[in-house]
Amino acid sequence: MRRSPFSKHVAVAAAAVFAFAVNLCRADTPVVPTAAAGTPVRVTGDQARQKLAIKGIFIKPTNLKIGVARVGLFCAGDEEIRFSDKVAGPVMQSAGRITRTELEGAGYTVPEESAFDATGLGADVEYQIAATLVDLKIDVCMNNRTIEGGVWLQINWELYSPRERRIVYRAVQAGSHLTKDKMALGDMYEMAVRSAVRNLLADPAFVTEATQRARGTVAKDVEVLAITSRFSGGGASQARIAELQSSVVTVYSGIGSGSGFFISPAGYLLTNQHVVGDAKFVKIKLASGRELLGEVLRTAAERDVALVKTEPVALAPIAVSGGEASAGDEVYALGSPFGEPLAQSVTRGVVSGVRTIDNVRWLQSDVTIAPGSSGGPLVNAAGGAIGLARSGVPGVNVNFFVPIVDAMSSLKITFHQP
């Protein structure tokens, strides 16, 4: 049957009205912001060998209106979208996987286990990263289960240094994905998250903070420092506890407190690098209550040790042991667990083993240590320091210490015998 000219005009007019209606409906649709994805800075060498663990992916819903979903033939039926767990949850479900993939793609080493794995060895992880979804905007048209439109989001990134016990980087990075192609909403979410991660990895401030470990390493051309001290030559430590306690100090920096111990009457003492952080000067409090100013001379973040110098002290320093520890050896740990109120605490135990984890040596012991004990000495039955307290697994007495010989080597220290 032939169509009349009038029918043709009606068909053309109907098509024009249809197109106008679609464009009109979409013209009223608020457009989500756009955030161009940056190019991640690739890290190499020592920077790439640092471990950056993903601590967590979080959501901070506000229940505020964040957009609309338009449904139906003309995408004219508005469905209000609010920032709730139900809406935001799917956005972040794959965020951990995407963050890991992008970090590895940029050269970072991301452990398979979380930062809080069974070993409790914070030294395995230089940094922990967390992401919190803080804002989200959605504008999509849904028709026959296909979606087009846009998603924009903001993620608050935090980079935490276990060594320094503080957040060293915090910034909000945006990401977005807008498309006229039909695609699944979940894929749209993932593309927006990926954009935000890449903007993080392109931020020079993030790259600078996330690659700081190398700055804490003693330079290869630094002259070896000879300290007048002695290796332990015997004498049961149990009979010398009071003398040992007098050489253990509480170290205060801008990031908290820890423990340390004198190794020379000239005022040299050892502690952890994460206790002093980036400080050039720290406060040293003696067992007597006297306070001294300590200058941080050297740090070696790869072994988490630091050398501090105060004025000369009228104390018998803790001798450094020249022997190797063995499983079953009797040992004592001294320090200031939970800070100054429990300063110069002493616990007794045995060496549980000498462990090598990721090519790094550790002394494992069942002696009790707690936050604040970091940097305190582990001494053997002869009264000689064999290690520095580093970390432990709460409640099970699985604790780890930096071998004293490794600390000396990392800091380029030798001992001159008087």
Image: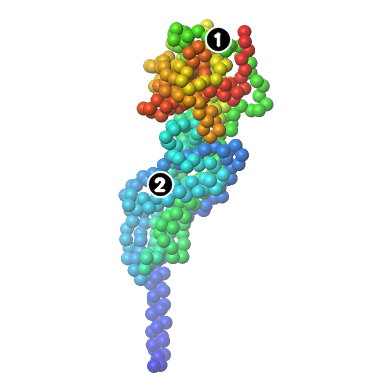
Residue drawn at 44 percent across, 65 percent down: 182
Q: Where is residue 352 in the image (x, y as percent from the top left)?
A: 45, 24
Q: Where is residue 244 in the image (x, y as percent from the top left)?
A: 47, 11
| Observer-nearest of 26 and 109 | 109
Binning the other alpha carbons within 10 Å of mark 2 as few (below 14), some (14 to 19) or many (20 upward) gives: many
Relative vertical location of residue 9 with respect to residue 143 in this rendering, above or below: below
- In the rendered view, does 321 fall on the left or right side of 120? right
Residue drawn at 52 percent across, 14 percent down: 384
Q: Where is residue 199 in the image (x, y as percent from the top left)?
A: 51, 48
The residue tagged 1 is 233
> Between tags 2 and 1, which lies in front?
1
Q: Helix or strand or loop: what does disc 2 sit on?
A: strand
What type is the residue that disc 2 sits on? Leu
Residue drawn at 48 percent across, 51 percent down: 194
State which quadrant residue 108 falls in: top right
The residue tagged 2 is 133
Tell me whether the residue at label 2 lies in contact with that at label 1, contact meaning CB atoms closer than 8 angstroms: no
Binning the other alpha carbons within 10 Å of mark 1 as few (below 14), some (14 to 19) or many (20 upward) gives: few
Residue drawn at 46 percent across, 30 percent down: 165
| Observer-nearest of 122 and 58 | 122
Relative vertical location of residue 125 with respect to residue 368 in this rendering, above or below: below
What type is the residue that disc 1 sits on? Gly
